[in-house]
Amino acid sequence: MTLEVWAFVLIVVFCVIVGLVAGFFGARALMKKELKKNPPINENMIRAMFMSMGRKPSEAQIRQVMNNMKKNQ
């Protein structure tokens, strides 16, 4: 059984496209699941962290921590 060159190239291109689409949607679903399980840090989490260390944070401190987090991402 012989396969023409153009048919082989067409099959390979089709498989690559299908793989890229499947990989995109798989990675997207995985990222959504991980973000739902481990949400990004927010101001309430920073407040709770300060309170657990026995400190009452000021709004300036919270904003400073948030800015540092955003800058270092």
Image (cartoon, rainbow, N blue to C red):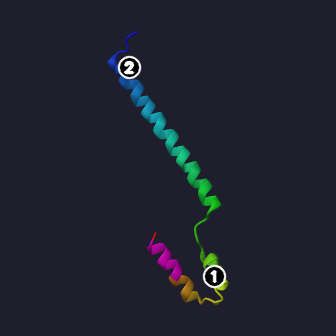
User: Residue 41: horizontal and vertical position, in percent?
Assistant: 58, 71
Q: Secondary structure at mark 1?
A: helix
Q: Residue at coordinates 36% horizontally, 25% vertically from top-left?
A: 9
Residue 11 position within the rendered picture, expressed as x and y whole percent measured from the top left: 42, 25
Rendered residue at 47%/36% (across/down):
19
Height in image: 47 above or below 7?
below
Write down the residue under mark 1: 47
Range drawn in magenta: 65-72
Q: Which residue is mark 2?
A: 7
- Around disc 1, counting alpha carbons within 10 Å, would you say few (fewer than 14), some (14 to 19), or many (20 or more)? some
Q: Mark 1 near mark 2, Cβ–Cβ under 8 Å?
A: no
| Residue 70 spot, x, y in % from top left | 48, 73
Please identify the quadrant where the N terminus is shown.
top left
The residue that appears at 47% across and 78% down in the rendered structure is 68
Q: Position of residue 21 (x, y in %)?
A: 49, 39
The kind of residue tagged 2 is Ala
Secondary structure state at the residue bearing disc 2: helix
Q: Is residue 8 left or right of residue 55?
A: left
| 68 magenta-colored | yes
Asked which quadrant contains residue 71, the reply is bottom left
- What residue type is disc 1 on? Arg
